[in-house]
Amino acid sequence: METTSPTLSRKAQIDQTATALFRRRGYAATSMRELAAALGIEAGSIYSHIKSKEELLHRICFRVADEFMAGLRAANADADAPAATHLRRAIESHVRVLINDVDASAVFLHEWRHLSEPALSEFVQLQRGYEAAFRDMIARGVADGALRTPDPAFATLTLFASLTWLPNWYRPDGKLSPDQIAERLTSQLLYGLAVPDGPAI
Amino acid sequence: METTSPTLSRKAQIDQTATALFRRRGYAATSMRELAAALGIEAGSIYSHIKSKEELLHRICFRVADEFMAGLRAANADADAPAATHLRRAIESHVRVLINDVDASAVFLHEWRHLSEPALSEFVQLQRGYEAAFRDMIARGVADGALRTPDPAFATLTLFASLTWLPNWYRPDGKLSPDQIAERLTSQLLYGLAVPDGPAI
DNA sequence: CCTACCGATCGGTAGG
DNA sequence: CCTACCGATCGGTAGG
């Protein structure tokens, strides 16, 4: 079911296979016996490498969260750049993280709610901070005249929607490179679909 | 846990309570005993009203699908209107369906993959037809000069992303009415965030 | 890493 | 609609 590189440690193989299964079938609907079968071992054997099923989910979610956070910091590192440039760079970084491991990203986006406390609250806090940073970039872009929107919070939601949806359709064998996707996404979000001086719609 | 109107039939109460639970906890993670407890009855008693757990999911998913399809047909009914108008009306209809029952919409959007065959294939077919209709409206809008995009298929994905994300943030007690949300979403997707003759970003 | 197993819980049914 | 229960499967462990 799964071709794993022989250079991966068993623990890394477990993580990778679990990521693919959690994405395809959902965390709750994936049993440890399925995971074991995909790895070619017995269910009990998994527990010599991990403590619990949730540990797998926890590691996936927080690893991806760390990557998003690091990308956000890098995008804002140049304090002299205008807010709209920070925003474009942050979108590009986000797309790159998503594409770099689309299975893990999909689990991060859709399965985090199965975390239990206190990890759940910690995760939600990270998400909120990340979204607030995007809202802030948009608001600063509006303030300095580069962007316009009647509602920065609303614009942030739409932006996040497009970013979040990406793992649902991205195929690694597609024609668009990560940079092309980021560029196209950015341009469509910034400039929209309507012809500038075309007819009212 | 749940306040259900006394005018609802028991079956309608089961559907409504199941919808709320499937949304909050996910289909796979919701047990029939949880559902029974939320209804104030015993687990076995549910089965005098329904045949199986999946029947509940099936009914939710296909009812919402029917509503989306009906809205799409209505939006395209006026054959003389330009494609961009069809598109705007279809977006407005979509938003109204989502907001009309946000729990059911969220289940429709996120839990359909737990359907088993042949319902699963049937559902995917409906989804594909719906998406194709939006892609077609965008392509016709580009052809008649009202819209512009380097990639209609890509634009369709971004549009769907924004529509799909809505149940994740919409709060019935929010300040925006359904029509305001539809209008704001449409305008942002069509006109983007950038100031028309502002600086390059 | 396997065998053998634990208690808990699952969806669902029979009979009343 | 409840009581009492079915076989199957769950996450996880002990001992080797």
Image (cartoon, coloured by chain):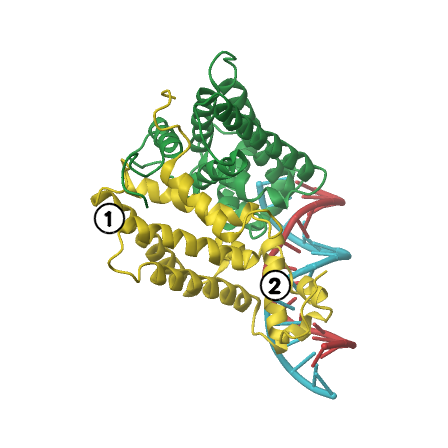
Chain colours: A green, B yellow, C cyan, D red
Q: Amino acid at mark 2?
A: Ala
Closer to the camera in the image, B125 or B33: B125
Whether residue B5 can be seen here: yes
| Front-most of residues A17 and B200 | B200
Name the residue type under label 1.
Arg
Q: Which residue is mark 2?
A: B18
Q: What chain is tagged by disc 1?
A: B
Q: Residue at x 59, y 61 (%)?
A: B19
**Circle 2 Cα neighbour tier, 10 Å, few/some/many (<14 / 14–19 / ≥20):** many
**Does residue B65 lie above or below A151 as drawn?**
below
> Most extreme residue toward the left, as rendered?
B143
Query: Image quadrant of residue C9?
Result: bottom right
Where is residue B68 shown, x and y percent of the image? 42, 60
Left or right, residue A53 beside residue B130 = right
Most foreground residue, A76 or B186: B186
Residue B82, given in percent of the width and then of the height, sits at: 26, 52
Query: Measured from the top left, where is residue A200 in percent x and y?
Result: 31, 43
Q: Which residue bears the numbered disc 1?
A: B140
Tell me: residue A46, above or below residue A82.
below
What residue is drawn where x is 53% and y is 45%? Answer: A22
Secondary structure found at label 1: helix
Q: CA distance from mark 1 to mark 2?
A: 40 Å
**Mark 1, residues whose alpha carbon is within 10 Å: few (<14), some, or many (≥20)?**
some
